[in-house]
Amino acid sequence: MAVAKSTLELLMIVVKNSNVHSKRIEGTLFLIDLDSDSMIELNEVGSCIWESFSQTETFDNIVKKITDEFEIEPERAKKDVHGFLKELKRCDLISFKEA
């Protein structure tokens, strides 16, 4: 089952919710959700992931970017990116589409 899930993730592109905007304040990236009138502060890794959505990025490309930029093991990066994307999806900040 994990293989199918990983394969599916590799084929998906992350799409930002159009009602979510980002703003960098004193080096920290904040997400402003206009639907819920909330603001979310992202850490450095979360900011890197969020900013990669401005391009057409697949799960695999995001993991590679995090692995390269933060010098962490690929399996750890996959787990962290998957958890972050799952939370963003749960909050309706992103959606997925087929690549």
Image: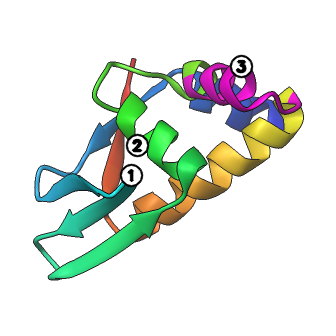
Q: Is residue 50 above or below residue 85?
A: above
Give residue 61's position: percent from left, percent from top: 57, 18
Find disc 1 in the rendering and name its residue. 27
In the image shown, does 78 or 96 lie closer to the viewer?
A: 78
Whole-number angstrom distance, CA of label 1 to CA of label 3 = 21 Å
Count of marks, rendered view: 3
In the image shown, does 58 or 47 lie closer to the viewer?
A: 47
Q: Secondary structure at mark 3?
A: helix
Find disc 3 in the rendering and name its residue. 68
**Residue in the picture at 10% in, 71% down:** 34
Q: Is residue 44 above or below residue 54?
A: below
Q: Amino acid type of disc 1?
A: Gly
Q: Main secondary structure of the magenta part?
A: helix
Give residue 21's position: percent from left, percent from top: 17, 55
Determine crowd level at label 2: few under 14, some 14-19, many 20+ residues with C-alpha closer than 10 A.
many
The quarter of the picture where the C terminus appears is top left
Q: Which mark is residue 77?
A: none
Q: Which mark is residue 50?
A: 2
- The magenta region covers 62-73
In the image shown, does 73 or 93 lie closer to the viewer?
A: 73
Q: Quadrant of residue 66?
A: top right
